[in-house]
Amino acid sequence: MDVDGLVPQGTGTWIVYATIHNSDLSRFTTAVEQSTSITNVDVLRETEGMTLVGLTVSDFTLVDALATQEATVQAIRVGPDGGRATVLCSPSMDIRTFVETCQERLSELRLVRRQPLDAETTSGSGLKYDLTDLLTQKQLEAIQTAYFQGYFEWPRDASGTDVAATLDVSAPTFQQHLRKGLKRIFEDIFDARIQEP
């Protein structure tokens, strides 16, 4: 299972968007049935060989531990024998202290590899950047949830009302957060291009 997106719900729960390879679907179903922290599963899309699901998770110790250390989760992959997370930390962070602090909440956590990233590696195409610096938490939640639920697909896989219900807000509130967030992203992209020499 690959975690594609995480949306905090503010009540200690998370909506986790994940892709499951169909060959792993039976193991995933068994794991969900045995889990005490996964309270809801919604199948959002099924494609050839893959299934996108939305999980409501009441206790996501790994992400909670990383969030308290102000680390950014880049990727999470979970399998039958455990999981692996790729985490981005600030260059000034003491990694040994970071790992020890996370291990206080998740004792089986181990540092597998530490790799410094240069600006060229992290910048990519120039369009990928940390939206948390640009958007409010509500705007980011609205955009992520809409994206993973298929709101931007044609035809739509989920309506604005569906996405609003997932976020536990009214449809007009969802639309407001979505439109303001998209406007900020577009302003950032297009204003930057206008100002380039």
Image (spheres, helix red, strand yellow):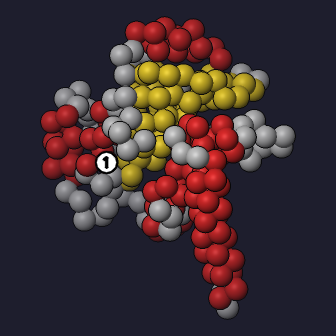
Residue flagged by tag 1: what amino acid is it?
Ala
Judging depth in this view, the residue of 156 and 186 nearest the camera is: 156
- 30 versus 114 height, above or below: above
Count neighbours of disc 1 (C-alpha within 10 A) and say few if under 14, some if 14 to 19, many if 20 or more.
few
Residue 98 horizontal/vertical position (percent): 21, 49
Judging depth in this view, the residue of 75 and 110 nearest the camera is: 75
Residue at the extreme bottom of the image, as rendered: 197
Identify the residue at image location x=66%, y=29%. Answer: 44
Q: Which residue is mark 1?
A: 67
- Residue 40, visible in the rendered structure: yes
Identify the residue at image location x=38%, y=44%. Answer: 10
Identify the residue at image location x=51%, y=28%. Answer: 55
Residue 171 horizontal/vertical position (percent): 64, 47
Judging depth in this view, the residue of 4 and 183 nearest the camera is: 183
Count of labels in the image:
1
Residue 154 horizontal/vertical position (percent): 83, 43
Q: Quadrant of residue 188?
A: bottom right
Residue 56 horizontal/vertical position (percent): 47, 29
- 14 versus 29 height, above or below: below
Q: Quadrant of residue 124?
A: bottom right
